[in-house]
C-alpha cells in the first residue's frame, strides 16, 4: 500500500523561481505529491505563471501574506504539511535601494512568521520533530558580499558580508533560520544560490529586461562599466537542486548552488543580442531593431557588488548535483520562451511596470 501523499507548502510560488519549481515538481512527481502555494501576489507574483497547473486536484493556491501570522497558522492547522520550501521574498536589489522597509518586512519578519508557524505545528512536547518534516529556506549568494579578487569563490564557510538592503534582509532571514536550527533543532536547510535566468522572470532583472528592450529597439541600460560579474544558473537546474537538497541533504546544513558560469554583464548583453539575431527569421520586422548600438552605459547601481561566484563543491560531493544547462543552451531556451509568450510579457509590462521603468531609468 502507498504511504500518505507528501504535502509541500511553497511560499512565493507565483514568482519566477517558485513557479518554475512548482512546474518541475509536478513534472517529476505528478500525482504523488500535493502542493499548496501561499503567495501574496505582489507586483512580482503572477497567477498566469501557473495556469497549466491551476486545475490539478493536487494543487491549491492560497493568496496570503507570509507576514500574516493568522493566515499562515491556518494553512498549517488545516493541512498536514511535510515540507516547506520558502521562496517568498522581495527580490530586486534596485528596488531595495529605493525602498528598503518592505524588504525587512517580508524577508525578515515574513521568514520569522514562517519559522514560528512551522515549529508550532511540528514540534513535539519533548522538543523533537516527526521524521520527514523539513523546511528549506531559499537564499542568495549575495549574503556573502562582493568578491574583489580573481580566483576567489563563495563557500558555505565564507563569512556573511551583505552590502545592499536586499542582501542584508536575506542575511537576516538566514540568521533566523540558523538560530531556529541551533536553538530548537528545527529541521531545516538553507540554500544560497547564484543568479537565475529562464522562463517567467520579471523584466526588471537584467536578462529579461535586455531581451524585451532589444526586441523593441529600446536602449539597453548597462550599469557602470558593464564589467560586474554574475554567476548565471538556468532556473530549472536550481529547482532540481532544491528538490535534491530536500531528498538527500543533511539536515541543518547550508548548500551553495551555482552555475560555474561567470560572465560580465556586458558579455551577457552581447550574447543576448547575437542570439536574438541568430534566432529571428529574416522576414521578422524585429530583426532590424536588435542591434549593439542600443547598448547604453548608465549611472552605476549604488554600492554595486563587483563579482559573485559560487563554489558548488559541497552540493556536488554530498548530493551529486551539478549545473546541467550550458549558458549557450539556456539562453536560447529562455529567448524561445519569451518569443512564445509575448502576451505574458505585454501583460506584465503594462501598467505599474511603466511607472517603475520611467522612475528607475529616467
Ligand atoms: P520573485 O520576485 O520573482 O518572486 C517572489 C514571489 O514572492 C512573488 O510571487 C511574490 O508575490 C511573493 N511575495 C513577495 N512578498 C510576499 C509576501 N509578503 N507574502 C507572500 N508572498 C510574497 O523572486 P524570485 O527571483 O523568484 O526569487 C525567489 C527566492 O529566491 C527569493 O527568496 C530570492 O531571494 C531567492 N533567490 C533568487 C535568485 C534570483 O536570481 N532570482 C537567486 C538566488 C536566490
Ligand atoms: O545573485 C543572486 C541574486 O541575483 C538574487 O538574490 C536576486 O534576487 C536577483 O535579483 C539577482 O540579483 P542581481 O542584482 O545580481 O540581478 P539583476 O538582474 O538585477 O542584475 C544583474 C547584473 O546586471 C547586476 O550587476 C546589475 C546589472 N544590471 C541590471 C539591470 C536591471 C544592469 O547593468 N542593467 C540593468 O538594467
Image: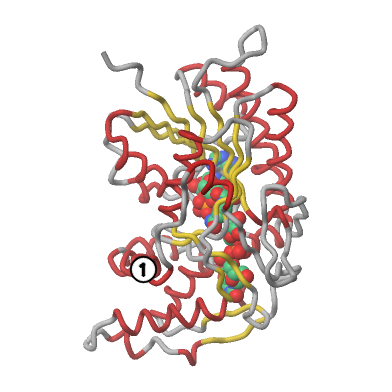
Under 8 Å from ligand 1: the CB of mark 1? no
* Quarter of the view holding residue 291: bottom left
Indicate the position of residue 149 as horizontal and vertical percent values. 74, 71
Indicate the position of residue 70 as horizontal and vertical percent values. 59, 23
Residue 89 appearing in the image: no
Q: How is the image coloured?
A: secondary structure
- The residue under the point 73% across, 39% down is 175
With respect to residue 99, does 181 lie above or below?
A: above
- Number of other residues with Cα within 10 Å of mark 1, as a class: few under 14, some 14 to 19, many 20 or more: few
The number of numbered badges drawn on the structure is 1
- The residue under the point 33% across, 16% down is 3
Report the quarter where the N terminus lies.
top left
- The residue under the point 70% across, 62% down is 98
In the current view of this chain or complex, which residue is farthest to the front? Answer: 317
Closer-to-camera residue (269/75): 269
Indicate the position of residue 220 as horizontal and vertical percent values. 52, 81
- The residue under the point 54% across, 15% down is 130
In the current view of this chain or complex, which residue is farthest to the left? Answer: 283
In the shown orientation, is residue 199 left or right of residue 74?
A: left
Closer-to-camera residue (337/6): 6
In the current view of this chain or complex, which residue is farthest to the top? Answer: 125
Which residue lies under the disc numbered 1?
329
Closer-to-camera residue (6/317): 317
Report the quarter where the C terminus lies.
bottom right
In the shown orientation, is residue 240 left or right of residue 297?
A: left
* Quarter of the view holding residue 107: top right
Indicate the position of residue 165 as horizontal and vertical percent values. 73, 55
With respect to residue 229, does 181 lie above or below?
A: above
Residue 227 appearing in the image: yes
With respect to residue 277, does 232 lie above or below?
A: above
In the shown orientation, is residue 287 left or right of residue 186?
A: left
Ligand 2 quadrant in view: bottom right
Amino acid at each position: 500500500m502507498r504511504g500518505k501523499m507528501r504535502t509541500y507548502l511553497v511560499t512565493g510560488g507565483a514568482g519566477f523561481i517558485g513557479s518554475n519549481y512548482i512546474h518541475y515538481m509536478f513534472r517529476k512527481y505528478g500525482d504523488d505529491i500535493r502542493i499548496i502555494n501561499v503567495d501574496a501576489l505582489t507586483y512580482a507574483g503572477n497567477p498566469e505563471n501557473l495556469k497549466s497547473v491551476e486545475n490539478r486536484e493536487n494543487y491549491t493556491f492560497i493568496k496570503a501574506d507570509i507576514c500574516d501570522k493568522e493566515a499562515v497558522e491556518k494553512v498549517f492547522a488545516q493541512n498536514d504539511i511535510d515540507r516547506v520550501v520558502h521562496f517568498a521574498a522581495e527580490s530586486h536589489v534596485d528596488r531595495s535601494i529605493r525602498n528598503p522597509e518592505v524588504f525587512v518586512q517580508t524577508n525578515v519578519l515574513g521568514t520569522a512568521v514562517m519559522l514560528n508557524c512551522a515549529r508550532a505545528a511540528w514540534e513535539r512536547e519533548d522538543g523533537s520533530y516527526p521524521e520527514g518534516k523539513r523546511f528549506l529556506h531559499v537564499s542568495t549568494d549575495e549574503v556573502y558580499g562582493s568578491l574583489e579578487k580573481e580566483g576567489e569563490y563563495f563557500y558555505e564557510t565564507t563569512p556573511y558580508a551583505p552590502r545592499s538592503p536586499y542582501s542584508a534582509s536575506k542575511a537576516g532571514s538566514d540568521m533566523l533560520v540558523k538560530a531556529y536550527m541551533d536553538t530548537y533543532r528545527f529541521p531545516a536547510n538553507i540554500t544560497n544560490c547564484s543568479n537565475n535566468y529562464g522562463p517567467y522572470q520579471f523584466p526588471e532583472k537584467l536578462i529579461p529586461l535586455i531581451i524585451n528592450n532589444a526586441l523593441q529597439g529600446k536602449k539597453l541600460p548597462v550599469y557602470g562599466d558593464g564589467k560586474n560579474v554574475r554567476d548565471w544558473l538556468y532556473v530549472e537546474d536550481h529547482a532540481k537542486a532544491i528538490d535534491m537538497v530536500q531528498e538527500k541533504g543533511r539536515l541543518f546544513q547550508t548548500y551553495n548552488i551555482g552555475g560555474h558560469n561567470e560572465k560580465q554583464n556586458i558579455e551577457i548583453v552581447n550574447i543576448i543580442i547575437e542570439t536574438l539575431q541568430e534566432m529571428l527569421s529574416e522576414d521578422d520586422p524585429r530583426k532590424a531593431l536588435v542591434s549593439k548600438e542600443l547598448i547604453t552605459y548608465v549611472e552605476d547601481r549604488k554600492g554595486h557588488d563587483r563579482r559573485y561566484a559560487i563554489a558548488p563543491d559541497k552540493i556536488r560531493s554530498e548530493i551529486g548535483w551539478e549545473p546541467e544547462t550550458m549558458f549557450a543552451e539556456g539562453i536560447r531556451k529562455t529567448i524561445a520562451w519569451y518569443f512564445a509568450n509575448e502576451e505574458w510579457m505585454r501583460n506584465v509590462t503594462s501598467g505599474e511596470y511603466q511607472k517603475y521603468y520611467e522612475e528607475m531609468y529616467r
